[in-house]
Image: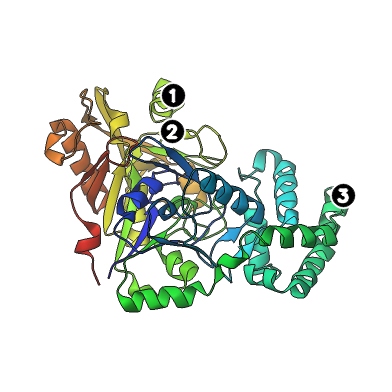
Amino acid sequence: MTVMVLIGAQWGDEGKGKATDLYGERVQWVVRYQGGNNAGHTVVLPDGQSFALHLIPSGILTPGVTNVIGNGVVIDPGVLLTELGGLDARGVDTSRLMISTDAHLIMPYHVAIDKVAERYLGKAKIGTTGRGIGPAYGDKVARLGVRVQDLLDPSILRQKVEAALDIKNQILVKIYNRKALDPDRIVDDVLEQAEGFKHRIADTRLELGRAVARGDNILLEGSQGTLLDVDHGTYPYVTSSNPTAGGAAVGAGIGPTAITAVLGILKAYTTRVGSGPFPTELHDEWGEYLRKTGGEVGVTTGRLRRCGWFDAVIARYATRVNGITDYFLTKLDVLSSLERVPVCVAYDVDGTRCDEMPPTQSGFHHAKPIYEYLPGWFEDISACRSFEQLPPNAQAYVRRLEELSGSRVSSIGVGPGRDQTIVLHDVLEENRG
């Protein structure tokens, strides 16, 4: 049995869908354990088909795999139905998708408040996607949330929506000068939507517990990335959940002692979407080069990603807070044709060298990158299928990133396709429990 957590080691958008797809044929379960439709995974199949997934685990594209939307996820019913419909229309079998009874629902009032609150923040805005994720998690913690299981009992659903709107309508009308929302319409709409997926609702904790006992291979798939974790990220410019590896046990309902491997996903450079500090961000032609060559456009939002050179400080941090056993390095091919490749090895914070993440928000905000320059390569590496086929300078770049990050690189992405991957170590086999 291998229970492997797959986590982004930067600010998200590292290529987690590709990694999930790589191991999907050898696992029996893929579990999405946190986040909502504010995230997106792109998977490109060998035949060239590209799929953008937002709520549904990437394992849905692998026949025979059971996919789970875990209790740690917040679900917009309309988005879920749209995504299922799109997959069905393209011939993807979605019959093996299960949804936790205890996952929380994103309601229309969450979306309304998210959008209007972000606008009112002005220059202090967080950079949210406006999809109601934060308000839904806020209600979860405040014990005002609506859970998937409530769809099975209309009377409880109605009571919860009415209680929530007693507060939310006051906020919308008196603070933001918006119209009050009708609880009857919301309840009727969500119950109608539930008809399209309530047959998928299950006690996923029990099912996953049985899978662990049988010795099944399970992949726990996070969204976003380490630096967007609400506890361990660049707060307040973070998401509202815990994408770090510790959140996998909570969000899936699997005991932490069952986890045998943590696979971190690292892009060969760095990107982020939304507001917040970003020490290696480039505002010149090199930033545009990375954005254009890497196709750096958000899967969910369509926003252009901010781009910068590889940051070894946050990679070391991700290794430590996640307990990363292996790294999957993606988009190495984007760096081809550079004469030299800068790598941030430390920060200068107000004249003091910092080799680790500054412990304060202001310290990170003032961090300036200290670069080491590695020789580049000009060869096209997209057809390489072994480490030895990579140009010597590309090999040296990978080995230096291993050294700086503190964990081995087990796989390397050399293109967007499913087959454009170099595998150095078999994470599933080498981390069996």
Give the foreground label among 1 and 3. 3
Is 385 left, or right, of 133 in this rendering?
left
Q: Where is residue 17 in the image (x, y as percent from the top left)?
A: 40, 47
Badge 3 marks a residue whose secondary structure is loop
Residue type, label 2: Cys
What's the mark number on residue 307? 2
**Which residue is label 3 attached to?**
179
Given the image, on which type of amino acid does mark 1 rest?
Glu
Counting residues from the N terminus, which is met first, the one under dot 2 or under dot 3?
Answer: 3
Q: Which of marks 1 and 3 is nearer the N terminus?
A: 3
Q: Residue at x 35, y 50 (%)?
A: 21
**Quadrant (top left/top right/bottom left/bottom right) for the C terminus:** bottom left
The residue drawn where x is 32% and y is 30% is 334
The image quadrant of residue 258 is bottom left
433 or 176, which lies in front? Answer: 433
> Which badge, 1 or 2, comes first in the chain's sequence?
1
Q: Is residue 141 left or right of residue 257?
A: right
Q: Is mark 2 on a helix, strand or loop?
A: strand
CB under 8 Å between callouts 2 and 3?
Answer: no
Regarding mark 1 in the picture, which secondary structure is present there?
helix
Residue 281, image x and y in percent? Answer: 44, 33
Which one is nearer the viewer's eye here, 285 or 394?
394
Q: Name the residue under label 1.
A: 288
